[in-house]
Image: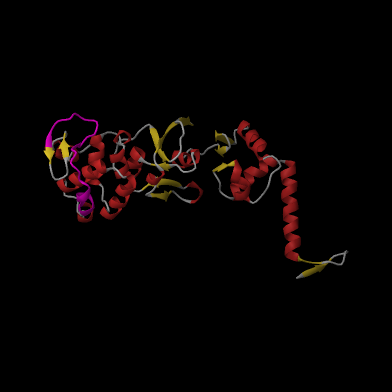
Amino acid sequence: MITFLANKRFVSRDSIEQKVMNDQADISNAINPQLYLIKLLDDYEINIFMLNDIEKRVNYSFANIQDIAEKLVQKGLLKRIERGKYCRHNFNDEWVISNYLINDGVVAYWSALNRHGLTEQFANTIFVQTAKEKKGKSVFGVDYKFIHVAKRKLTGYKMYGYGNNQYRMTDIEKTIVDCFDLPEYSGGYAELLRAFNSAVLDANQMVVYCKAVNNIAVTKRIAFLAEYLKKPDFDVFFKYAKPLVNGKYNLLDPIGLDTGEHISQWKIRLNISKDEISEICNKIY
């Protein structure tokens, strides 16, 4: 349907209705821009946001979005995560927040082991893998530690959560490989051995991630353990690992003592004995 206006221009009814809606929005914003921002956050179900993209997400431009956000913080309706990043006053999802603290951040290591149900031990710190440098910090009582890695290692993650509350986290295979690569962030070597033993692993994916990490000692340790613990369907991993075995012996536990049995096939020195490995993996909490 069209409408004939006094200036003899024809416009659609939809255009008129849209203009009315925009005018009403502008009036609401002019009267109370803080209240209008909260309304838009409700309408779009947004719990966490950055100033540099919130206007695009809600499809509306404010005169001074930073000033509005800061006033809402003062009134207790928003919380400031860090400069330019905010969330609703009752939002406390540390996993989602971890991704907002650095734009390529991925929940990893001990934190991912726990989220995947591979350890009952829970760190007081959220470990975030990133290809950027960032100092650790505490947000709303939660400590975050950022583990800087080469960009090639920043792979093997999926989106978890739902809707606007999604976050990136390494999948099970990448979590295991990462923990062997940097075991100091795994919650302890015994926890890592138990996690490896209990995890259902895709050997093809393990190959992909070992290639990305590019740490021969890690590949050798995983190959030995997979063989000793009789991990099923690992032939493709053994085929990948065998040509990489060099003349150097690596300790099974890289921070343990230089002692124990030598395993010539994988050039691994068992500073944790086979009996100890079995005892650790069979331990019931």
Name the quadrant of the C terminus: top left
Does residue 111 appear left or right of residue 282 in this picture? right
Residue pictured at 65% horizontal, 43% vertical: 37
Looking at the picture, tell me which residue is in the foreground, 189 or 264.
264
Give the image location of residue 67, x and y in percent.
Answer: 67, 35
Task: Confirm whether the magenta stretch covers residue 245.
Answer: yes
Name the quadrant of the N terminus: bottom right
Q: Is residue 232 above or below residue 63?
A: below
Q: Quadrant of residue 270?
A: top left
Q: Residue furthest front?
A: 247
Q: Quadrant of residue 115?
A: top left
Q: Quadrant of residue 269?
A: top left
Looking at the picture, tell me which residue is in the foreground, 239 or 272.
239
Q: Is residue 85 above or below residue 141?
A: below
Range of magenta residues: 238-261
Does residue 20 appear left or right of residue 246 in this picture? right
Residue pictured at 33% horizontal, 38% vertical: 110
Give the image location of residue 13, x and y in percent.
Answer: 75, 65
Give the image location of residue 154, x and y in percent.
Answer: 40, 45
Number of callouts: 0
Residue pictured at 60% horizontal, 50% vertical: 57
**Res. 195 in view:** no
**Res. 58 in view:** yes
